[in-house]
Image (cartoon, grey):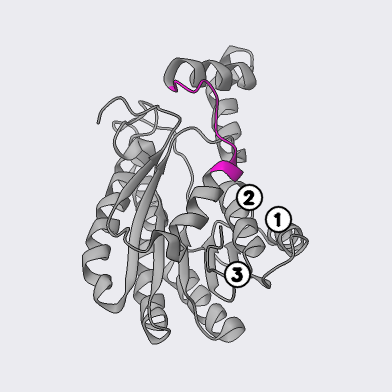
Amino acid sequence: MDLGLAGKVAVVTGGSVGIGLAVAKGFAAEGVDVLIVARDTARLDAAQAEIAAVGGGRVAAVVSDVGTAAGCDAVIAAVQQTFGGVDILFNNAGTGSNETIAEADDAKWQYYWDLHVMAAVRLARGLTPLMAKRGGGVILNNASICAAQPLWYEPIYNVTKAALVMLSKTMSTEFIKDNIRVNAINPGFVLTPDWIKTAKQLTADTGGDWQGYIDTLAKDNAPIGRFATPAEIADFVVFLCSARSSYSVGSTYFVDGGMLKTI
């Protein structure tokens, strides 16, 4: 199926690893020019080379912390300078948390709010005018199944991802007048380095069998019985950002192997 993406320009935050890297590779394979964003220079350089090896679209990278206003400004400037505009924004930068409400301080709440919510606000504010000039575009926000079905050990993550889903819905009604479609995805268990880090933290006091923890978690919670690969999520993301999903506006899609327990 021709997705009609060749020649488009996409910004992928958190693009050096996991879902972001897989999505950037998926875009490149479709002929999309991609700007990947991350904080770690060495990891970003490696990711850029890996995406370039896919062929197809051009790939550029910018070292930036989108959890800050200055970091978002740097991304907006970089895509203008490098590609002259943008058609797609995949807000993917984020990370899991591990705390209790009683013990987490204000600074931790603020950090996750800025990373998961304000980054999407700031980038949309700066990039939607560029999309409008090109006739429209797509914003896809990567939230989480935890936005609707929370995990007990990460209340801050649960709350900020739920806010991102509501932000997506609100954005969709505001930006569609400029032919900018906004949607969100709620992935379930995806085997990313961040998940492995969390599993190691949670098993540190009980022998460190993080792989066993991952396997048990999937079997106990997801009917499919396993974690998704980043590439499986990327295939869905690339489709949602294409003209083949042109009537999809303001929706949130669960990509969770059946994990969600409600309708």
Query: Residue 176, percent across and down?
Result: 27, 71
Residue type beneath disc 1: Arg
* SS state under label 3: loop
| Residue 92 makes an appearance in the image | no
* SS state under label 1: helix
Q: 244 or 40: which is nearer to us?
A: 244
Q: Give the range drawn in magenta.
A: 222-232
Q: 220 or 206: which is nearer to us?
A: 220
Which residue is tagged 1? 43
Query: Residue 185, percent across and down?
Result: 39, 48
What quarter of the picture does the N terminus occupy? bottom right
Q: How many neighbours does mark 2 have within 10 angstroms: few (below 14), some (14-19), or many (20 or more)?
A: some
**How many numbered dots are placed on residues in this image?**
3
Seen at 78% across and 61% down, the residue is: 53
Whole-angstrom CA distance, mark 2 to mark 3, is: 18 Å
Q: 141 or 133: which is nearer to us?
A: 133
Which residue is tagged 3? 32
Seen at 34% across and 29% down, the residue is: 260
- Image quarter for residue 158? top left
Seen at 60% across and 65% down, the residue is: 36
Which residue is tagged 2? 17
Whole-angstrom CA distance, mark 3 to mark 1, is: 21 Å
Q: Is residue 198 above or below residue 169?
A: above
Query: Residue 153, percent across and down?
Result: 39, 27
What quarter of the picture does the C terminus occupy? top left
Verify CB contact (< 8 Å) between mark 1 and mark 2: yes
Residue 123 covered by magenta stretch: no
| Residue 65 makes an appearance in the image | yes
Seen at 44% across and 34% down, the residue is: 188
Secondary structure, magenta segment, majority class = loop
